[in-house]
Image: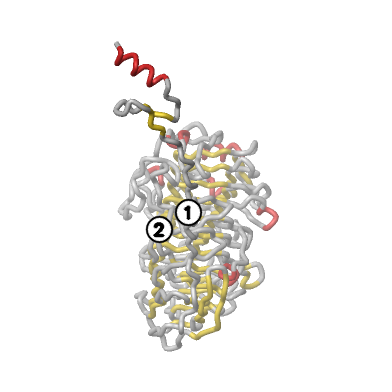
Amino acid sequence: MLIATCSVAALSGCGANDIASPGTGGNVTINNVTPAPTPTPTPTPTPTATLVTPAAGCPTIANDAQLTAAGTLSGPTGSYLVCNMPARITRSSTLPFVRGVLYQLNGRVDVGNDQGPSTTGTSNVVLTIEPGVIVIGAPGASWLGVNRGNQLQAVGTPTRPIIFTSRDNVLGLNTDSSAGQWGGVVLLGRGQITDCAATGAQPGTVACERQTEGAADPSLYGGANNTESSGRIQYMQIRYSGFVLSGNSELQALTTEGTGSGTQISFVQSVNSSDDGAEFFGGRVNFRYYISMGALDDNLDTDTGLKGNFQYVIVAQRDGSAALGADSIIEADSDNAFDQQLPRQNTIISNFVFLARVASANNSTAILLRGGTDYTLVNGFMDAQNSQSCLRISRTATADTTASLGVNATNLVVAGATTGNDELGAPVFRSVQFRCPTTALQGINGVTDAQVATIFGAGTNNNSITYVPTLTNGFINGATETAVPVFNPTTLNAASGVASTSGSLNGAAAFFDNVTYAGAVRDANDTWYTQWTCTSSVLNLGTNNTGACTALPVFS
């Protein structure tokens, strides 16, 4: 008991700062010492990107005429040696990636000489551009033209895209509203076209040629070879293009003219073209992964007998761009005196998202189909609630529901013919969802609104004009999009010669992937739009890319 009592007594005498030591019979006091303050750590310096310094000289290329140094250009990312490209590439040559070098189109630059409409072979002169290369257009009518019988091999990588842009972009002067600071990239081929320049020329033959719109000197395309290759374009940004060449003729970011099906195009971003995002004249086009943002006319313009297949397409118009001339998402063909020429245009698009933001377009609609075109849209979404209408169809030939397959001997429509007019029937829509204004579907020039409503078929074939988006960032599928049943596009090919509703390729090669979703981007795990692109306020593509379109990336 004594021991217990003493223990209790000892403990009762212990304050918060004292501990009794039973081994001495007394108290041992340990005083709390005020700790020395923790020293403030020296902050780690924020890493600073190393500014680019100009290369010592322009690289030597295989061409007869060499690159020429044209001074330096400095901007937020550093200083660069500007190397002017020769006016014509006459020998197959490579533009290598060299840190501190910008290759400049100092006016029109031709790849090879025009080999005409009837020769064969497309490797006469090949211009190769390495990943990470930046090509700038001098202010004004500067553009790259790849002539018939020659090729462009511009193949970037996801982390090192090839970039065509303007001097102001290098100088750091551009904003998300800048546009039209140089020309663009043009591929010219020997595929079939219509609307021949020569009076009396038979469409779709070697006698039918056309001149590149606005070009001051001859820049011809057309022929009868729909399978040749004008090269390969992959992982490319084309920024701030579309300069007026003459009159009202402007170049697009990318223009194909009579190119053949052997031409490979994928992963191309068009940024703020002052004309169309891209335009396709005749021939054959097979194109996957296309992003168009901020174009000041149309975004996907198709003409003169094109047979075109497109899959995975994102289009975003710029808010407030109507006053600058921005028009439709899609403009298919033209109403003119050549409507009845063959081959008739047929374009198919699968897996798309269209953000239509122009309230007063010249075409008065987000999608304009005219000129007797055949057209198919499947597995896609469009938000056009602020447009004048979602869809317009012009002229009875465009809305014609009677198929008249094949191309007749004269490549001209024969009145009253039941076969041979290359007519696949009315436009086709499957698993297409639109958010529309009050006036959703319109017919003009002989087509009634009721006819267009029947053709679109809202409430059937998983089509709707009352779609309410749940897209993330405007283009990544949400719950609503994921729930839309999918149309299998694998039996479609614009060059098959049979209607999209036939379920047959008719011997044509398969192009479209067998997808499990409608829309351009399945979900957050679908990242095809990352790395190789740039981002802007027009379309927020996130942070996993080359950065803002208004700035240059720096590749090592």
| Residue at 59% over, 43% down | 384
> Residue 182 at x, y = what percent?
58, 71
> Residue 88 at x, y = what percent?
48, 82
Which residue type does callout 1 highlight? Pro
Residue that protrudes farthest toward the right in the picture:
323
Q: Quadrant of residue 61?
A: bottom left
Q: CA distance from mark 2 to mark 1?
A: 58 Å
Residue that protrudes farthest toward the top in the picture:
1
Along the line of sight, which residue is nearer the eye, 489 or 158?
158
Check disc 2: other Cα within 10 Å, few if <14, some if 14-19, many if 20+: many
224 vs 436: above or below = below
| Residue at 47% over, 32% down | 460
**What is the quadrant of the N terminus in the image?**
top left
Query: Quick one: SS at disc 2?
Result: strand
Q: What's the mark number on residue 286?
A: 2
Whether residue 149 is visible here, answered yes or no, is no
51 vs 499: above or below = below
> Residue 420 at x, y = what percent?
42, 55
Q: What's the mark number on residue 41?
A: 1
303 vs 97: above or below = above
Give the number of callouts: 2
Check disc 1: other Cα within 10 Å, few if <14, some if 14-19, many if 20+: few
Q: Quadrant of residue 309?
A: bottom left
| Mark 2–mark 1 CB contact (< 8 Å) | no
Along the line of sight, which residue is nearer the eye, 435 or 528?
528
Residue that protrudes farthest toward the bottom in the picture:
64
Which residue type does callout 2 highlight? Asn
Query: Quick one: SS at disc 1?
Result: loop
